[in-house]
């Protein structure tokens, strides 16, 4: 993840990835990205903007210009809490929240986030739990999150843990559905449909290999 | 009247007092709720960040099951958690609007021997209570009016944005009207739909903590006795981290944060254990007693 240097980064056109905006705009309703008038309503509405390295408006501009690495490495995409405040205010009807979620998906697929970065780890753990059990067991999820990112947090949260126990809100029971095989069929059908439609996402596979070669992951 | 009920993970986990109070309130109002059999994860925000299409598939299975169980294509599925409500609604919209989503999901459902005809209505309990049962019907069943109680109604984000049509996206008022029909006062609180920080409280607490703190601080400043919530994540963030906020921001915070259905239950005279009031970190009863002029009425 890049530290913000205090001044804008610039790139020569040859260094930009001009396929990136097209790839991102392939999400449902994604063409609206090209309607952005850079008014900044999204950044003004966003309650998280103050903590972001690039404001939502900048992320849109950078995506359209092809700043692939900067966008996918930005802290911004992980700070979006999906409150949809920007999306309902956008005068050009851009699905900004869904666009941030699309960028998160791409960053996860390409593995471009620090190993123990909690937002991405939470997403992965959540995903795995659903794949295995069809449901997510809250207390277990949180324990696994801390164990994998910052075990010290477990000790810092001990008071909270006791209170949850005392009020009967803590449970290590594994929540599971009755027909996991049905769910497995459903999810693998999505997988194969996507393979047929996009030719095994060759694009990001190549990119991932390139990143690994450069030692990013 | 009967509705199908989609609990989601949180109402079976750390926020079972939401489930308890929802069930108790609907029962007291003579509405049958039937839990969706073999429901799976809704595909909430954290899952969607990994694979959106699979999230749609998860939500679509729930919708298909609802259609089967409701024995009608126009079944109503009630989702109390804002995260579930959003993902189920989003899936419904995308299935109707985008053919690429629609094709993939139909194909996946077929592989699991399911089908879905896009007709299930996804509703939040707040919407059902205010717009289907009606404030008058609720007011007529009040046994213990919440006289003088000042409530800050917190709607959070995902039940009003971007899909819900039952209330305003920035300045919703349905819960305010509901609380007034129970005899309570509501405080004017412009942050009612501002983000609580969501899962950032767990993942990036340096950011999550101040977001929730700002909400509570403003509610307190405006004279609220209690914050009423509609979402498990909001309730958890606003209530369970108050001691951490007090430490970090060097200021004592002790403001009860309850589910709107818990306040309803109290007004309807439902015993407190059935409403899960004993599960709150910051008890509600002292505030109620204070407002009732020192009379501590146990129900």
Image (spheres, helix red, strand yellow):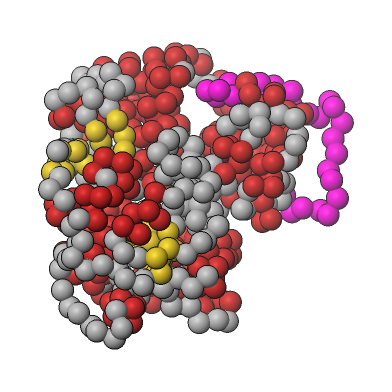
Residue B284: horizontal and vertical position, in percent?
A: 31, 74
Residue B252: horizontal and vertical position, in percent?
A: 50, 82
Which residue is at a point 83% across and 43% down the rendered structure image? A9
Magenta includes A17?
yes
Q: Nearer the viewer, residue A185 or B234?
A: B234
Left-right relation of B192 to A24:
left
Left-right relation of B227 to B260:
right
Q: Which residues are magenta?
A: A1-30
Q: Quadrant of the N terminus of chain B?
A: top left
> For residue B94, which quarter of the picture?
top left
Tell me if residue B114 comes above or below residue B37 in the rendering. Answer: above
> For residue B293, which quarter of the picture?
bottom left
Residue B272: horizontal and vertical position, in percent?
A: 19, 69
Q: Can residue B113 be seen from the camera position used here?
A: yes
Q: Nearer the viewer, residue A38 or B55?
A: A38
Which residue is at a point 51% across and 61% down the rendered structure image? B188
Tell me if residue B65 comes above or below residue B257 in the rendering. Answer: above
Q: Quadrant of the C terminus of chain B?
A: bottom left
Residue A117: horizontal and vertical position, in percent?
A: 55, 53
The residue sitting at the bottom extreme is B294
> For residue A212, which quarter of the picture?
top right
Which residue is at a point 39% across and 21% down the rendered structure image? B95
Q: Nearer the viewer, residue A189 or A208?
A: A189
Tell me if residue A100 comes above or below residue B204 in the rendering. Answer: above
Magenta includes A10?
yes
Q: Main secondary structure of the magenta part?
A: loop
Q: Can residue A154 be seen from the camera position used here?
A: no
Q: Nearer the viewer, residue B113 or B150?
A: B150
């Amino acid at each position: 993840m890049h530290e913000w240097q205090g001044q804008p980064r610039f790139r020569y056109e040859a260094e930009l990835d001009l396929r990136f905006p097209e790839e991102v705009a392939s999400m449902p309703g994604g063409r609206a990205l090209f309607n952005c008038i850079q008014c900044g309503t999204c950044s003004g509405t966003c309650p998280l903007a103050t903590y972001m390295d690039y404001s939502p408006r900048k992320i849109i501009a950078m995506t359209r210009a092809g700043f692939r690495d900067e966008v996918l490495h930005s802290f911004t995409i992980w700070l979006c809490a999906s409150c949809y405040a920007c999306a309902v205010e956008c005068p050009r009807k851009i699905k900004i929240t869904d666009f941030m979620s699309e960028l998160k998906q791409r960053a996860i697929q390409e593995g471009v986030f620090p190993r123990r970065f909690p937002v991405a780890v939470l997403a992965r753990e959540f995903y795995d739990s659903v794949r295995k059990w069809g449901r997510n067991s809250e207390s277990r999820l949180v324990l696994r999150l801390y164990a994998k990112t910052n075990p010290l947090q477990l000790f810092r949260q001990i008071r909270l843990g006791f209170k949850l126990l005392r009020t009967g809100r803590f449970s290590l029971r594994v929540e599971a559905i009755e027909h996991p095989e049905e769910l497995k069929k459903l999810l693998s059908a999505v997988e194969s449909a996507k393979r047929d439609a996009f030719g095994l996402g060759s694009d990001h596979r190549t990119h991932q290999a390139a990143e690994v070669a450069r030692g990013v992951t | 009247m009967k509705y199908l009920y989609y609990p989601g993970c949180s109402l079976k986990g750390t926020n079972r007092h939401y489930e308890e109070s929802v069930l108790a309130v609907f029962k007291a109002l003579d509405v049958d709720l039937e839990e969706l059999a073999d429901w799976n994860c809704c595909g909430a925000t954290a899952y969607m960040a990994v694979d959106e299409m699979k999230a749609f598939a998860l939500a679509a299975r729930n919708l298909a099951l609802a259609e089967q169980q409701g024995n009608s294509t126009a079944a109503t599925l009630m989702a109390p958690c804002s995260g579930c409500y959003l993902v189920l609604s989003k899936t419904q919209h995308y299935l109707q609007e985008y053919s690429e989503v629609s094709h993939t999901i139909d194909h996946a459902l077929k592989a699991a021997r399911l089908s879905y005809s896009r007709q299930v209505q996804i509703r939040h309990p707040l919407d059902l209570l205010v717009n289907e049962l009606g404030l008058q019907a609720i007011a007529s069943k009040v046994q213990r009016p919440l006289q003088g109680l000042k409530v800050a109604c917190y709607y959070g984000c995902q039940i009003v944005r971007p899909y819900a049509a039952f209330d305003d996206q920035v300045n919703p008022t349905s819960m305010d009207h509901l609380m007034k029909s129970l005899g309570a006062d509501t405080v004017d609180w412009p942050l009612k739909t501002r983000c609580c920080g969501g899962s950032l409280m767990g993942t990036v607490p340096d950011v999550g903590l101040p977001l929730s703190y700002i909400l509570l601080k403003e509610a307190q400043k405006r004279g609220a006795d209690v914050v009423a919530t509609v979402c498990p994540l909001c309730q958890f963030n606003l209530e369970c981290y108050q001691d951490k906020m007090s430490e970090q921001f060097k200021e004592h915070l002790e403001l009860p944060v309850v589910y709107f259905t818990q306040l309803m239950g109290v007004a309807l005279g439902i015993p407190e254990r059935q409403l899960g009031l004993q599960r709150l970190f910051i008890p509600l009863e002292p505030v109620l007693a204070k407002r009732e002029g020192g009379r501590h009425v146990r129900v």
